[in-house]
Image: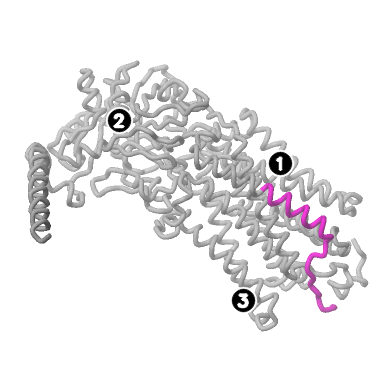
Amino acid sequence: MKRIVYREWLVQPQRYWGLLAILAALVAVGGLSALYMEHEGHWVTGMTNSVVWGTPHVFAVFLIIAASGALNVASIGTVFDKKAYKPLARLSGLLAVALLIGGLLVLVLDLGRPDRLLVAMTTYNFSSIFAWNIFLYSGFAAIVIGYLWTMAERKGNHLQKPVGTFAFLWRLALTTGTGSIFGFLVGREAYDAAILAPMFVVMSFAYGLAVYMLVLFYTFDADGRPIGPAMLKRLRNLLGLFVAAILYFTLVYHLTKLYGAKHSDIEAFILINGGLYSAMFWVGWILIGGLLPLGIIYHPELNQQRDWITTACALVIVGGFAAMYVIIVGSQAYPQEMFPGHNVIQFGAPGDVGGRIAPYSPSLPEILLGIGGVGIALLITAVGVRVLQFLPESLADRDVDPHASARPAA
Amino acid sequence: MNHETESMNQGRRDFLGAAAGVSAAAVAPGMFLHTPVANAAARTEPVTDMHRWGLLVDTSKCADGCTACVDACDTENGLNLQSKPLGDDKLKWQNQRSTWIRKVKLQDNLTGNVTNLPLMCQHCEHPPCVDVCPTGASFKRADGIVMVDRHTCIGCRYCMMACPYKARSFIHEQVDQKLTRAPRGKGCVESCTFCVHRLDSGDISTACADACSAEGHQALVFGDLKDPTGPLRQALAKAPSRQIRQDLGLNTGVRYTGL
């Protein structure tokens, strides 16, 4: 194997500054939206006392789990000694940190009192999974930065394996923690399931890899770096495996819920008569995020073409947002069942929802805040690859895998 | 010069003396007025677990269409001072305004029997809202009252996700008017406090229970769950009662009969 050479992203300046300007505009608009929401209060959002977490959480949770998933590519190289993945590791670490920062910013700016962040960082209640997550998230960022250092600095190379292994275990804990935010909520029918934690881990694998692949393809295309067909096949097949695993976990989650009679109503809501939420489940989560990408990835001809693989990645991401929307918003819209065997005729003042589906429609500032989070993640990535040596010069098969020529390409 | 200074000092002394006298005159009646009513130590010393405050709702006495408890709570805790932000949708505002008690009307799916009941924070012994709060702002007092510390609440709304009773409200709007006894601020979460300001000044009552009695329904009995001879325990002894979502094992402070 040749020595891997890393180079700053050498895209043309006009294109680079154009990209930065677009991303900076997204971040600015997101920031202004947050200011507006903070100034006016949350009444300007679609959120209510029934749907308390709205679109910002959809973006934030997606970005956070994608962050831990993006690190997987590095882990496969370091922890599982797959040499072919080693050149991919630096970008993997950078994306992980960037996505995490984007997600956390959205989460923090959607707080009722974002000005009290310091309180959150100094006053802890350790029976709260949220408090644990504050450590898991900030620790993740610190560990991954250390991990990047072991990759980039020759003196730190010997620490790469232990630090990489630690980062891998940490990211598993992190996503388990994120899944548990929902999994431990006993009072809501759709949650209260331990399987949500491993399901979030598997989702993170897929979403993180899909984001990683898109960023990799874009940056490599932009300054003409090659990606070999064997490398493409590897990444594509890995994505297929993760997407299939999501479908499997989704199936088990719903089968478990369907088995108990007391959950049949919420299941009927999500799967059949939930209107937008059922549509998002079947069309977004299952079809767009699952079956279509799988169809492309395992199609003998389409899977040879970079454009189709790119499409599959984009579909996985769209499906991921749909899945987050169903899990986070759909599950809150469904009324909490407090009186089994009874029909709730009235719940508070007229208009106050109790026994009925809570209405929720995302407002523009919420959506813009979420997009701002995506913008900041991509902005950090774009600056990172430009000023530091994150990207390998070539992912051509002969440069990555010494035995590439001995094997058929795909 | 010295003489001038001396006379100025004298003037200052006179003023301070007069001010002290006026202050004493202003404060003293308050002290005298409050001392006999209040358990004077209660406000300065931490609450203890000698009491556990609770409420019994007799649903058979809870009248259809009556909202006395809700109205009393609104007035007592300044909830009636909330105003819909200009431009907010009317229906959305119904789900955004803070609500501490709800009148709930249920119909049994099999028998068709209709039941009315007030639903508020159930003041659990093992409150899920307290478990999930990252900063510990959501807390349970030694006397069983579950509250929110408005100084440490960051408005993450995780407690609202965790509450099985939908008892908590988030303040979605800028608050212009509020009562000293029930402070309220944009971006924090709140819920029923069992009229803690009354308890802390020695008045063992809640606005909802008082209003229900005043209407002649007597559907609400407030008291100490730990006092075997008190009115609450005696009422509990008379008829079987249950907790809403009893399956969760939260050991709520609010109990219901006839449900």
For marks 3 and 1, the one nearer the N-term is 3
CB-based contact (under 8 Å), mark 3 and mark 1 = no
Residue A292 shown left or right of residue A364 in the figure: right
Q: Quadrant of the C terminus of chain A?
A: bottom right
Q: Secondary structure at mark 3?
A: helix
> For the residue carrying disc 1, how many other residues have a C-alpha within 10 Å: few (<14), some (14-19), or many (20+)?
many
Q: Residue at x 74, y 68 (%)?
A: A390
Q: Looking at the rendered structure, which numbered label has been put on residue B256?
A: 2
Whether residue A282 is visible here, answered yes or no, is yes
On the image, the x and y values in percent for residue A270 come to: 61, 34
**Chain containing mark 3:** A
| Region in magenta | A1-26
Q: Residue at x 82, y 55 (%)?
A: A15
Q: Looking at the rendered structure, which numbered label has been put on residue A286?
A: 1
- Would you place residue A257 above or below residue B11 in this image? above
Q: Secondary structure at mark 2?
A: strand
